[in-house]
Amino acid sequence: MIRRTMLTISTIALTASLGLAQEAREYQTADELLLALETADEGVHTLRCNIVHTKLFGLAGDYQQRRGNLVYTTDPRQRFAISFEAMILDDRVFDSEKVYIFDGEWLVEKFPTDHEFVKTRIVAPGEAFDPLRIGEGPFPVPIGQKREEILERFSAELAPAGEGLADGAFAKAARAAEGSGWIQLHLTPNALFAEDTDLTDVRVWYDPRDLLPRMAKTVNEIGDESLVFLYSLEKNGETAEAEFSVQTPGDDEGWNVTLRDRTGVAAQIEVTP
């Protein structure tokens, strides 16, 4: 049994922005929303936004929050880069730089303060991997996925915008979701997929005017809750190849380098929280 640990940062999710001149449509069922989501990312080639990742650790009761930025592109393939500059732990702010980069084949985790560099091959050469696929990628956001792919692994329902955000750590997120009129899609792993994931609950919030995600929350089997909030979103802006570089530092650059290969174990991503 493969356990997939998600980087609920994202996370995520990943997403987007936009000219919000469109009129918000109402959705009566999750099935209706899932069908509309299949084409929600058409014309979206790059995304850039700020993110806040809040995590509550179920066993220890600790609270952690990281703030940073995300850039995502589909040109020429799906890639992303996430940079965190600060961490809030028990209401204290620490400089805690942390970088994640996925270039379509390799996932890199960098901890510049400690000069730690971890590089993991998660996609075999010539194969494709969707970094947004719920339960496999680091972003629990079903952008452009087929309704059938979601329903093969999850049961889906619409939920009130503020549901699942009762903890005080999520109070601002609850106000944003309710005040903005976002739609919440609530996903629960079915019996078969539950054997292949440590997730027990997935929630994604969409702006009904563009159907791109604004927030995503997951809960795992030990009770850890992770929420990704996206803001200041920009669609189809410029990106630089250097942003997605996974080049390994040289021996003389002072980094402690770890190289791993996970392509023999499906597309499992193992990341540190």
Image (tube, helix red, strand yellow):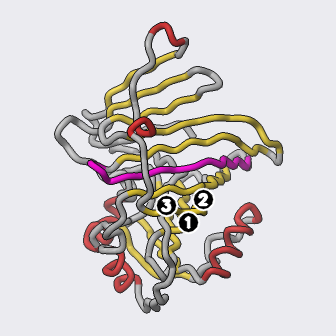
**Element carrying mark 2:** strand
Mark 3 surroundings within 10 Å by alpha-carbon count, few (fewer than 14), some (14 through 19), many (20 or more): some
The outermost residue toward the top is: 252
Q: What is the C-alpha distance between the residues marked 1 and 2?
A: 7 Å
What residue is rendered at 58% in x and 58% in y? 228
Residue 57 drawn in magenta: no
Q: Which residue is mark 1?
A: 215
Identify which amino acid the numbered label 3 is placed on.
Thr
Q: What is the C-alpha distance between the residues marked 2 and 3?
A: 14 Å
**Element carrying mark 3:** strand
Identify which amino acid the numbered label 1 is placed on.
Met
Question: Are the residues at dot 1 and dot 3 in contact (C-beta closer than 8 Å)?
Answer: no
Question: Are the residues at dot 1 and dot 2 in contact (C-beta closer than 8 Å)?
Answer: yes
Mark 1 surroundings within 10 Å by alpha-carbon count, few (fewer than 14), some (14 through 19), many (20 or more): many
What residue is rendered at 35% in x and 34% in y? 106
Q: Which residues are magenta?
A: 61-77
What residue is rendered at 41% in x and 39% in y? 244
Identify which amino acid the numbered label 2 is placed on.
Leu
| Whole-percent x, y for residue 36 in the image | 34, 80
From this viewpoint, is residue 124 visible? yes
Q: Which residue is mark 3?
A: 200
Foreground mark, 1 or 2?
Answer: 1
